Image (tube, rainbow, N blue to C red):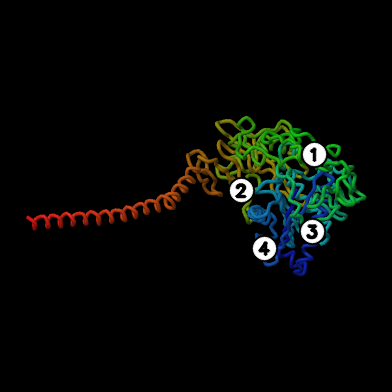
Amino acid sequence: MELYIVADNTLFRRQNKDYEKTKARIMEIANYVDKFYRALNIRVPLIGLEVWTDRDQCIVTEEPNATLWSFLQWRQKLKSRKKHDNAQLLTGVIFKGTTIGMAPLEGMCSLENSGGINDHSELSIGAAATMAHEIGHNFGMSHDHDGCCVEATADQGGCVMAAATGHPFPRVFSRCSKRDLDSYFQKGGGMCLYNMPNMKDLVGGKKCGNGFVEEGEECDCGEVDECTNDCCNANNCTLKEEAQCAHGVCCQGCKLKQAGTMCRGPAGACDLPEYCTGASPYCPTNVYLLDGSSCQYGFAYCYNGMCLTHEQQCLQLWGYGARPAHDACFEDVNAAGNAFGNCGKDDHGNYMKCEKSDAKCGKIQCHSAAKKPKGTNAVSIDTTIKTGGIEVKCRGTYVYSTQDGQGDLPDPGLVMTGTKCGEGKVCNSNGNCHCNRGFAPPFCEKPGLGGSVDSGPVQYDSQVGLVAGLLFAFLVLLPAVLLLFYCYRIKTSYYHKWLSQREKNKINKYSVHRSLC
């Protein structure tokens, strides 16, 4: 996972406006995060860092929700100038209440949601524990409930995904976190993580023994005392005699696997398989179906390699047997604009009402026989409405912050970005329906250019062709016509001169002939 870390202006000032000191602190935090995730077979190279020495580039306030969404919007612009998988903000601002960080659940690899915010701790290990926790949410890990963390006692720091942490700080992930991570990958999450990062971007320079194969190295299995690779010389990062490779899923027994060997099977309905090339020890970059491709028998669309459905989210929140409620539940409950029915929060932390067209992008409404939703701090919000003369029960969820909890998750009861909310439309990151090309927002029922009330219209290919045609006409055809006209005028002027001269000659001959007679 290629990580980009940003330090805000408040943190920079807390470090006495010392850029090198701030940079060193970020690198130390990143090293701890990488160390935590090695146990999950995930490496986290720091491929970029940024310190806002002059002023903040996004809104950073004590309101964590507004800060998170402002940073994630800024991160979308960062993505266009610096390739990365996930970005985290370290801030010197102290958030309201007990919140010390926040990140979207299952946001990893998403253009809109792959990132988080972290209240800075004086100790690097503390800041790293918070960052590892928020990245864990991006990976689909929920808070640990009772009985999850058997890997470490409270005196040892407990587990990373605990709802509340203290000193000593956690360093390990629980079995529940590992299960959540496996589930996330199995349904197609993390599609951006399968490419090899460009090690020239690695912050801190190359070093034999850091576990990353950099320029000039044939392999790198870590420090001499931790290397367990039979194909690599740990002291100089070279391959052992007769070894063709040392790392990668297309390397077995120090030899390259045969071309055509499947190295990564499809993870869900929206993913595609990859095969070894026979020339590289690494599996090719992951590819998946185009966003908007139909999946789940036409009931959903692919988004970032995942097939997201209301059914899937109801099962995730309520457990076996849960299913989405009647459409009228979404429309009635989410029109309230309160904690129990809404389309998310605005920049000021106020709940927003859902318009009818966006109702299926708000708080998810389910049918379930369970007593309560899954999770220790989740409660059921039950509403009964009448539609077509029939009473319908709607079950929503409300996740409250415990007294010692971090409250670091945007409402997991909101429908996930990319979920189909009607024919030809999906939920966007603002909780509004985004229409496919050919349909007009907000209802996506009438012909139009597509897009949403947030993004503006989609440009038709024919419009692009029209623009190209007009440019061709003005830049090529018009000059050509003018040139031909100019040549014609020149030619006709010569022709008229020749014609008049010929007439003069005729007249002169006629005059001479008359005089001779």
Q: With 19 as the anchor, is 227 left or right in this view? A: right
Between marks 1 and 2, how big is the CA–CA gap?
A: 39 Å
* Image point (57%, 33%), residue name: 387
Near mark 2 (Cα within 10 A), the count class, few <14, some 14-19 or many ≥20, is some
**Residue at the disc numbered 4:** 56
- Quadrant of the image for the C terminus? bottom left
Count neighbours of disc 4 (C-alpha within 10 A) and say few if under 14, some if 14 to 19, many if 20 or more.
few
Residue at mark 3 to residue at mark 2: CA–CA distance: 37 Å
Q: Which mark is in front, 1 or 2?
A: 1
Displayed quadrant of residue 415: top right
Instruction: Determine the residue located farthest toward the front in the rendered image.
Output: 516
Marks 4, 2: nearer the viewer:
4
Sequence order check: which comes first, mark 1 or mark 4? 4
* Residue designated by label 1: 249
Report which residue position mark 2 lands on: 430
Q: Position of residue 113 (x, y in %)?
A: 67, 48
Work out how far the residue at label 4 is from the one at label 2, CA to CA, in angstroms: 23 Å
Q: Amino acid at mark 2?
A: Asn
Residue at (67%, 56%) from the top-left corner? 71
The amino acid type of the residue labelled 1 equals Val
* Type of amino acid under label 3: Gly
